[in-house]
Image (tube, rainbow, N blue to C red):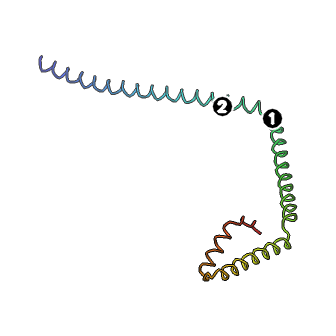
């Protein structure tokens, strides 16, 4: 009788282990289903929010505003080009540049003559010329 009871206990133990595994699997499935339900609710809420934004947004008005903005950018670009050309015409005078070059050449020549008159060598005159030219304001780029 004891042997029979030991065998029955072993069988019941194996069944209990199997049931425990089965209950664990069912619990995992329940957790998975709960997570899926949460994801479905989140997607539903997001789609409602997107629908509300789309309902409030005027696509035709937005398109018109973007077209007006693009047109204003083009007008601004044309005005900028016109201003650049006007400023270039106003300040781009070859005679002024030639006159400035002549004044600079004359000044450098006078510095050279002054240096030779003072008995300076070519290196010292060059150094003096560099010092004097650093005192002049820079010329605007052509």
In this view, the residue in front, 131 or 142, is 131
Name the image quarter holding residue 19. Answer: top left
Q: Write the residue at 25% across / 26% down.
A: 14
Q: Residue furthest top?
A: 1
Q: Does 86 appear above or below 70? A: below
**Disc 1/disc 2 C-alpha distance (Å):** 18 Å
Element assignment for label 2: helix
Q: Which mark is residue 49?
A: none
* Comes first in the chain, label 1 or label 2: 2
Q: Does 81 appear above or below 32? A: below
Q: Does 67 appear above or below 56? A: below
The percent position of residue 23, horizontal first and vertical second, equals 36, 24
The percent position of residue 127, horizontal first and vertical second, equals 61, 75
Q: Write the residue at 54% across / 27% down.
A: 38
The percent position of residue 4, horizontal first and vertical second, equals 15, 20
In this view, the residue in front, 72 or 112, is 112
Circles 1 and 2: CB distance less than 8 Å?
A: no
Q: Residues within 10 Å of mark 1 (few under 14, many from 20)?
A: few
In the picture, the quarter occupied by the C terminus is: bottom right
Element assignment for label 1: loop
Q: Residues within 10 Å of mark 2 (few under 14, many from 20)?
A: few
In the picture, the quarter occupied by the N terminus is: top left
Q: Residue furthest left?
A: 2
Q: Write the residue at 84% across / 71% down.
A: 96
Residue at mark 2: 47
Name the image quarter holding residue 12. Answer: top left
Q: Write the residue at 66% across / 83% down.
A: 116
Q: Which mark is residue 58?
A: 1
In this view, the residue in front, 47 or 4, is 47
* Image position of 66 (left or right of 18): right
């Amino acid at each position: 009788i004891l042997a029979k009871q030991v065998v029955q206990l072993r069988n019941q133990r194996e069944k209990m282990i199997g049931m425990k595994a089965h209950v664990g699997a069912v619990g995992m499935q329940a957790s998975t289903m709960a997570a899926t339900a949460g994801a479905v609710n989140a997607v539903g809420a997001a789609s409602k929010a997107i629908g509300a934004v789309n309902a409030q947004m005027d696509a035709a008005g937005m398109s018109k505003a973007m077209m007006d903005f693009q047109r204003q950018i083009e007008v601004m670009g044309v005005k900028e080009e016109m201003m650049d050309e006007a400023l270039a015409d106003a300040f781009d005078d070859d005679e002024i540049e030639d006159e400035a070059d002549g004044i600079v050449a004359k000044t450098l020549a006078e510095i050279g003559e002054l240096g030779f008159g003072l008995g300076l060598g070519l290196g010292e005159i060059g150094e003096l010329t560099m010092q004097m030219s650093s005192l002049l304001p820079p010329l605007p780029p052509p």
